[in-house]
Image (cartoon, helix red, strand yellow):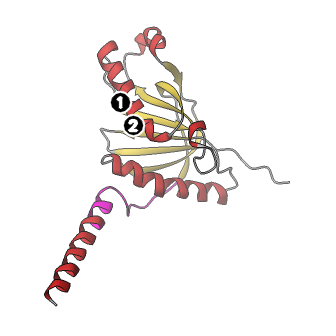
Amino acid sequence: MKTLQIVLWTIAVLVVILVSAYTYYGGFVTISPEIKEVGGETLVYEKITGDYSQSSAISDRVYQKLLEDHQIATTKGFGIYYDNPKVTEKDKLRADIGCILESDLDKMEALKKDFEVMEYPKDKYLVAEFPFKGMPSVLIGIRRVYPTLNVYAEQKGYAMDTPVMEIWDVPNKKIKYRKALVKIEKI
């Protein structure tokens, strides 16, 4: 009897810890997608092909190179994901990963020697936000936000398999998602 109580208490404590962690990293946050006009940021990035799990390392590399070689400190990272990993082979996934440049725009020519650089198009996108409290937030956001964006897109007559941009806004502790809008033509 005593052993059973210990096992049950251990399980209960583990469940409380897991639920608390899931809550802290945004697991129960309400996701409210909406269509907004956004964009216009200057992006400094690397193009990648392969597993999306390398995004964090690439983002860190771009950040460090900007800081060390160009003396530019950034506070927002991003990833633009072009392919759906559920239908595209891992080694063929395409993404642009890097940092958003908010100052030092006069260094653009020097940056073009080390990175891809572009201005993200200003347009109407399907957007949503999620708390950013570390890597677990990114992983939970993928599982919660992407399906919500796809359901909204489908209900409003937009294509589901369109590129999605994630902005990791460190100072504001948010992940901002932008899904490209492509209207489905009804036949």
Does residue 22 belong to the magenta stretch?
yes
Which type of secondary structure does the marked residue at label 2 adopt? helix
Residue at 28%, 60% (x, y): give it: 21
What is the tally of numbered marks visible in this picture? 2
Q: Quadrant of residue 175?
A: top left
- The residue beneath circle 1 is 60
Judge whether 31 appears above or below 50 on screen: below
Q: Is residue 1 left or right of residue 187?
A: left
Judge whether 40 appears above or below 107 on screen: below
Residue at 38%, 33% (x, y): give it: 57
From this viewpoint, which residue is outermost toward the left?
A: 2
Q: Which quadrant of the rendered structure holds the N terminus?
A: bottom left
Q: Is residue 72 left or right of residue 43?
A: left
Q: Amino acid at mark 1?
A: Asp
Q: In the rendered structure, are the residues bearing label 2 and label 1 in contact, judged by CB atoms less than 8 Å apart?
A: yes
Q: Which residues are magenta?
A: 19-33
Q: Residues within 10 Å of mark 2 (few under 14, many from 20)?
A: some
Q: Quadrant of residue 75?
A: top left
Point out residue 16 in the picture as x, y percentages from the top left corner. 25, 70
Point out residue 62 in the picture as x, y percentages from the top left corner. 39, 24
Q: Is residue 121 left or right of residue 7?
A: right
Which type of secondary structure does the marked residue at label 1 adopt? helix
Q: Nearer the viewer, residue 94 or 131?
A: 94
Q: Amino acid at mark 2?
A: Ser
* Residue 143 numbered mark, or none: none
- The residue beneath circle 2 is 56
Q: Nearer the viewer, residue 30 or 112?
A: 112
